[in-house]
């Protein structure tokens, strides 16, 4: 399963809840990047330049990281991928990775939300978490990238008939219930 949506739509929160309820491994590329930034690894230092500007980390870095992670034993019974793929070329790479590991996608869960609500939400999160990658200019840039690039990803999966859309705005528990109801219908 993939979870996809604009920055601030609640992907990380919902991914953790879905992972727990369905007993599948949640894999967040954002968490992996932030961990590497915190530990100042070469990958983290490279990724930080892009993250601080609100840009996507280059496909070459992201693809190799996802390839390694999806080859692990703990994903053979299922996984939830959060934050990847974000571009059309990453869709093709993920298709190759899945084919090589004899895995396939069952559903792409898309969380939807209004841009202005997302800006407010992300600015609030920036204050709480002290995240350097969340200021209004960077947030609007990231939303623009999402609309320009990631919506093409959703279209690709929509053509395959595996996209399930859920409104990501509202109290967390209500969004979780909408997500779980939508996943039951999708399966």
Image (cartoon, grey):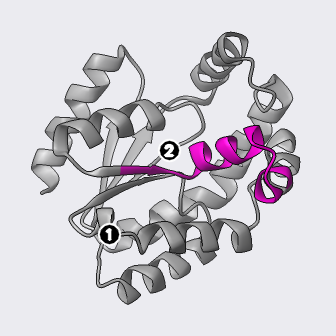
- On-image quarter of the N terminus: bottom left
**The stretch drawn in magenta includes residue 2:** no
Along the viewing direction, whichever of 21 and 93 lies nearer the viewer: 21
Residue 113 percent coordinates (x, y): 49, 31
Residue 158 vs 100, above or below: the answer is above
Pair 2/1: label in front = 1
Residue 40 percent coordinates (x, y): 81, 45
Q: Which residue is mark 2?
A: 5
Element carrying mark 2: loop
Q: Main secondary structure of the magenta part?
A: helix
Residue 174 vs 85, above or below: the answer is above
Along the viewing direction, whichever of 95 and 40 lies nearer the viewer: 40
Q: Residue at x 85, y 56 (%)?
A: 46
Magenta range: 26-45
| Residue 1 seen in this snapshot | no
Is 92 on the left or on the right of 70, as rendered?
right
Q: Residue at x 74, y 37 (%)?
A: 38
On residue 73, which mark appears?
A: 1
For disc 2, the neighbor class at 10 Å (few under 14, some 14 to 19, many from 20) is: many
**Alpha carbons under labels 2 and 1: distance apart:** 27 Å
Is 97 on the left or on the right of 83, as rendered?
left
**The stretch drawn in magenta includes residue 44:** yes
- On-image quarter of the C terminus: bottom left
């Amino acid at each position: 399963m993939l979870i996809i949506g604009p920055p601030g739509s609640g992907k990380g929160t919902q991914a953790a809840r879905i992972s727990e309820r369905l007993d599948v491994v949640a894999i967040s590329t954002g968490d992996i990047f932030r961990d590497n930034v915190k530990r100042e690894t070469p990958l983290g230092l490279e990724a930080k330049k892009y993250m601080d500007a609100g840009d996507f980390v280059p496909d070459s870095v992201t693809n190799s990281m996802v390839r390694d992670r999806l080859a692990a034993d703990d994903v053979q019974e299922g996984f939830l991928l959060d934050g990847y793929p974000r571009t059309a070329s990453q869709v093709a790479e993920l298709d190759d990775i899945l084919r090589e590991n004899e895995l396939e996608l069952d559903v792409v869960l898309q969380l939807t939300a209004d841009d202005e609500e997302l800006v407010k939400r992300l600015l609030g999160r920036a204050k709480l978490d002290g995240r350097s990658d969340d200021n209004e200019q960077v947030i609007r840039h990231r939303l623009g990238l999402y609309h320009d690039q990631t919506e093409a990803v959703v279209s690709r999966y929509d053509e395959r008939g595996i996209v399930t859309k859920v409104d990501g705005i509202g109290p967390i528990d209500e969004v979780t219930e909408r997500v779980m109801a939508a996943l039951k219908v999708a399966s």
